[in-house]
Amino acid sequence: VEVISYGYTGKILHVDLTTGKTSVDQHDEVWYRTYMGGGCMSAWYLLNNMPAGIDPLGPENMLIFSIAPIVGAPVPTISRTIISAKSPLTNAFGETQMGGFFGPELKFAGWDAVIITGKAENPVYLWIQDDKVELRDARAIWGKDTLESQTAILDELGDKRIRVANIGPAGEKLVRFAAVLHNMKHACGRTGMGAVMGSKNLKAVAVRGSNKYESYDPDTLRDRASWFNKNYMSNVANKELNVYGTAGIVNGMNERGMLPTRNFRKGFFEDAEKVSGETMTETLLTKGEGCYVCPVRCKRVVETNDQWRVNPVFGGPEYETIGALGTNCEVSDLAAVSKGNEICNRLGLDTISTGMAISFAMECYENNLLSKDELSGLDDLNWGNSVSMVKLTEMIGNRQGLGDLLAEGTKRAAAKIGKGAEKFALEVKGQEIPLHEPRVKGMLGITYAVSELGAEHTRVEHDADFDEFAPQIFVDQAKVLGLLERLPCETIDEPKIRMYYYLQHHFSMLDSLGCCLFGFAPVRAYTMTDLVTIVNAATGWESSLWELMKLGERRWNMTRLFNIREGFNVSDDRLPDRYFTGLENGAMADRPIDRTEFNDALRLYYDMANWDPDTAVPRRAKLVELDLMWAADKLPDWLEQGKKLRADGNIER
Ligand code: SF4
């Protein structure tokens, strides 16, 4: 195999935890370019090398840490590590990303990806020091939280500059939405990758590299980095992130009636100001922190000396966490929300699914589906009870009492509770809805339904960035994609589906390339041309926005094929019934999604994507066009499945 010279290292590490054996995969340049970036490479491996229908918590599941060719370049907002596997939460394609420093370090150690299969007999951690790969005994740190175990690993290896990705007790106990943490605050939260690590008896991956990042054109990379460092504060979105973090959107969302409140029954929370980014900055914030070479420093670090005694080592709450543990549970105590965030990062939990599981339980309690006797010692589960919220977060992470039930995710918990609890479980394909309102953000609702991960908010730029209130720069920067007009926020009509189709591929591409969504056009400082320039300077290729958009589309289709293979069908592209009724308050009250319009929008989208509109299966021609013929060869069976589904009339949402 011809060695890849720039951007990539040309080596992919395989570790079989059952046998303790390691091996190295190499691919040619065509493969690397066709499946450019961590997201695409992982999708290729999961489709190609993993059998269908495996148990996501069994040894056959492939857990993949992957990075893109531009990760490791000394350029801001390009540092993301992707972790992929079959998800134990959804049984579908699983993927999650984190910023921080782990991805660049993996590149410096000489690896493009690490693929972990099997199950260790006893707990271990994986230690990668350049070419030296070692499985080390982790029995002494099994059961320890993320801080204790990271500290022990760094002490044992004697180098504080080692980067660690680890799980806490939640991953060990197979909480289905357990997270992988890096440095206690960069979370790979979604789809339960922490539980996959736990199922393999893998406590952590520690990495240290001594190689330099090799690029084709370092001067151009330096030039773009220097431009970003000088100019990012002129971009309104990046400035807000720097000053208030992601929580800077709380008050605006509330005013517009789209702040999830009381398990998405309301869009306006009376006490939103108390949990806003502005309040955090004025009260609990000690500093902002960032990822590898990023000046935006949007990460919050908070500390309190009150009853909650929040430890700053675990960072501070993002917007999603404030929505999930705060507004959606009607908890207005920012210190309590920060404590919940600390517990999630300490035990290794996804804050979104954790908070959504708690608001689900609160609604079950309100409707007498959970009695006081079933609360495992909590005083009550009334809306706004911050003490119960914090205690229940801890109980979920440790799988204690009611927490054990909720650790299964809201879909499974609702099925167990019965009595109609399903209507309070806000999930798609089993993954809990993020804290963005699909009745107000129209194309976001479409992506919740269609996404390979189940409900996920990072699959498309949000509608509000292109409506009548959006800054002109956002609208202007989308024009390079052929999106020339502002569109109303809540619509899902033909122009909006076209916008969705383009922006979704764009986000899929950014994700695969390890780009932080807070760095790039259309909303943030780098233009789309900058991205192409960076990819070309890193790799030496003459790529284009066209090729990169096709990369995003290729990845999107590969993950769809993975889910079809795992038995998902068009009826899984749905939204919970709640969103087809109106919000109870706020500026967007009483404006439900129209079910007929929603189904029509999905059909139009499938047609646009060249997927069969009845079955949502990619047509063979689309797979040929995306150079996925190897998958097309397997397609006839899937097409038959799709036809059968149609004949059975078994399509409902
Ligand atoms: S913008 Fe924030 S999340 Fe993105 S790379 Fe910079 S510090 Fe990290």
Image (spheres, helix red, strand yellow):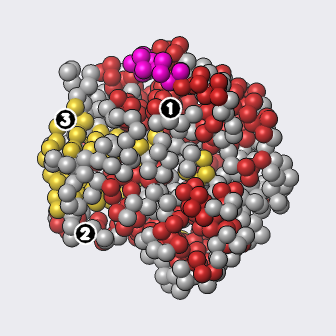
In the picture shown, does residue 521 fall above or below 627?
Answer: below
> How many numbered dots are placed on residues in this image?
3
Q: Which residue is mark 3?
A: 24
Residue 287 is covered by the magenta coloring: no
- Residues at marks 1 and 3, CA–CA distance in whole angstroms: 30 Å
What amino acid is found at the position of numbered circle 1 in the picture?
A: Ile
What amino acid is found at the position of numbered circle 2 in the picture?
A: Ile
Q: Is residue 39 visible?
A: yes
Q: Is residue 314 visible?
A: no
Q: Residue 141 shows which numbered tag?
A: 2
Badge 1 residue CB within 8 Å of ligand 1: no
The answer to whether the residue labelled 1 contacts the one labelled 3, judged by CB atoms less than 8 Å apart, is: no
Residue ID at (50%, 32%):
564
In the picture shown, does residue 646 fall above or below 376?
Answer: above
**Relative side of 583 to 3, left or right:** right
**Mostly what secondary structure, the magenta segment?**
helix
Q: Position of residue 458 (x, y in %)?
A: 56, 44
Query: Of marks 2 and 1, which one's residue comes earlier in the chain?
Result: 2
Residue ID at (53%, 13%):
621
Q: Which residue is mark 1?
A: 564
- Residues at marks 2 and 3, CA–CA distance in whole angstroms: 28 Å
What quarter of the picture does the N terminus occupy? Answer: top left
**Relative side of 561 to 248, left or right:** left
For the residue carrying disc 1, how many other residues have a C-alpha within 10 Å: few (<14), some (14-19), or many (20+)? many
Q: Position of residue 224 (x, y in %)?
A: 44, 36
Helix or strand or loop: what does disc 3 sit on?
strand
Q: Which residues are magenta?
A: 627-640
Badge 3 residue CB within 8 Å of ligand 1: no
